[in-house]
Structure formats: structure tokens, C-alpha cells
Image (cartoon, rainbow, N blue to C red):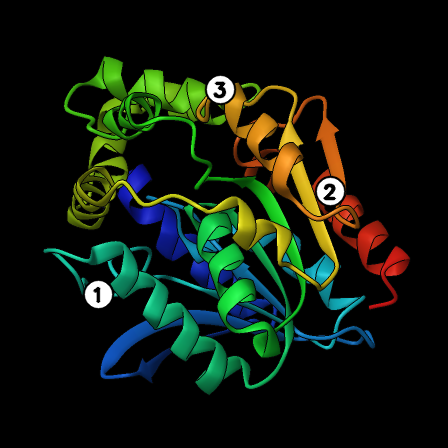
Amino acid sequence: MDLISGFPEVTRRMLVARGVRSEMVDVAGQRLHHYELKGSGKGPPVLLVHGLGGAANGFARLFFGLAKRFERVLAVDLPGHGFSPEYCLGPACVRGQYDMLVEYCRKVVGGPSFVVGNSLGGAMSVQLAAEHPELVRALGLVAPAGADVGHERIREVLSSFDVRTAEQSRALTRRLFHRPPWVMMLFANALRGIYNTPAVRALSADALATGEYLKPEVLKSLAMPVLFVWGGSEKLLPHQSLDFFRSHLPGHARLRVVEGFGHIPHVERPDELLSELVQFADASGL
């Protein structure tokens, strides 16, 4: 087992050793892997939703801090990500992933939660909140995708996940982080298989084919507390995305642009992101 391919399993074992439950659940006929940690706080359950090519493991360093403030912490591997098997390799792939998220919330989470989504997970979390507000107590958007910034800009973002060489892998790594970890740059060639999975390829192709983006009226309709966090060092999504969300999120949304945050602050700056989430929860009465 090489260093990179074995790292997800090492992370999983470390979490289990510290009391996090790791299990497969049956959701609408699809097997999904998820983590669950019982918390000691009085806040609602927290559901963490990763982005394109990500995994529940990416939130590992948030679990225990959140558990001090909330009653349960959950993170799910969407189909074809992390430890969840493939589901969609054809048309309507994005919608299929979203439908699985809805059913997971109904069957596993079982009630309204503080849904925190990153990147594609952020876009799906917005749709979840708009279409099924009974499942979302509050919404946290961390560098969310889904902004209507033009097809060519979205094409450029998705093409960066078409990783075929070590240099392309290093280029994508640099775009994801404020300061890329040296170990990921060193083992860039081994990361190609993680970045460019069948699920990533299918989701990218589907997103380009459908051209469906979040509608301004969907964002404006969000009635629950909303936190929007954007990185001052965001390099993956175009800066026009920030303008789009600023223009169309409801007036009660809390908007934060944080210096030192890249596209995945839950991986790179978990303590600072935890602070943003807890401050928002306190201010929102969660």
C-alpha cells in the first residue's frame, strides 16, 4: 500500500479509534459510507458535504471541535467518492448525487440539521435548503460552486480536474490550497487517481452538458440562517462567483471573506473554519 492510496484508510482508522463511527448505510438502494460522532453540545446535528473529488475524510479535523457544540456530527461520502461505491456514470449524474443527499438527510440524519457544504457540496446544499427547508435548520456555504458565471469559466474550472500528468496534478493542488502541503506536491503523480476518478469525470461531463446553475431566486428564497465563507486565496473558482453570491443571497446571510483561506479551508485551516462556524451558530441561536 503506497503512502497516498493508503492515507484515506489510515485517517478512517484514526477517527474510529477516537470514537467516530464509520459505516455503510443503504440509501434508496445505494450503499453510502458515512461518519457519525455523538456530540456533547446542544446545537442541532451538523451535516458536512464535500465537493467534487473530495471525501468525508477531508472534514476529519472538524469533527471533535463541532462535537463540543452540537449534538451529532455527520459527514457522508457521496457516490463514487471516499469509501462509497460508484453510482452514476451517465446522464443526470449531478441530479442523482443530489437525490442521494436528500434521501440520506431523510433516512440517516432524520431531521433538520446545520448543513455545511463545500464547493459542489455547497451548491447541492443550497438546492437542498431551497427544495426541502424542513431538512435544513441552517446553511453553511464554504467556497460554494454553482454560481452562474458563464459556461466558459465553468468549463475551465472543470477541465482542471482532468488530471493526466504529475504537472497537472501539481497545478490543481496549487489551486485548491492557500499554501499547498509539500507532501502533496512531492507525491503529485500518485494523486492523479484521486483527483481524476470515474465519478469526477462523470460529474464534470454532466455539469458541462446540462449547464445548470443556481438561480438568483433560489438563493433569495433561503429563509434559514445562512453563512457564506469565501477564501481570500480562492484560486479554483472564478472571482465572479463571489460577486454572484453577494448579489443574490438574502439580506440576513452572514458573508465572510477570510484571508488565508483557499478552496478547502476545512483541510488546510480547520481551526479557523471551526471558529467561523461556531460564531455563526452562536449568533444564529442554534
The three-letter amino acid code for the residue at tag 3 is Lys
Which residue is tagged 3? Answer: 235
Name the residue at the left extreme. 90
- Disc 1 + disc 2, Cβ < 8 Å: no
Q: Residue at x 34, y 16 (%)?
A: 171
Establish if 270 lies above or below 133.
above
Asked which secondary structure carries label 3, the reply is loop
The span from disc 1 to disc 2 (Cα, nearest Å) is 30 Å
The span from disc 3 to disc 2 (Cα, nearest Å) is 21 Å
Q: Quadrant of residue 60?
A: bottom right
Which residue is tagged 2? Answer: 271
The three-letter amino acid code for the residue at tag 1 is Pro
In front here: 165 or 1? 165
Name the front one of labels 3 and 2. Answer: 3
Q: Residues within 10 Å of mark 1 (few under 14, many from 20)?
A: some
- Disc 3 + disc 1, Cβ < 8 Å: no
Q: Residue at x 16, y 61 (%)?
A: 88
The three-letter amino acid code for the residue at tag 2 is Asp
Asked which secondary structure carries label 1, the reply is loop
Asked which secondary structure carries label 2, the reply is helix
The percent coordinates of residue 246 (x first, y second) are 66, 33
The percent coordinates of residue 229 (x first, y second) are 67, 38
The percent coordinates of residue 271 (x first, y second) are 73, 42
> Mark 2 or mark 1, which is nearer the start of the sequence?
1
Name the front one of labels 3 and 1. Answer: 3
Q: Residue at x 74, y 35 (%)?
A: 256
Q: Residues within 10 Å of mark 2 (few under 14, many from 20)?
A: some
The percent coordinates of residue 248 (x first, y second) are 62, 40
Q: Quadrant of residue 266?
A: top right
Residue 85, disc: 1
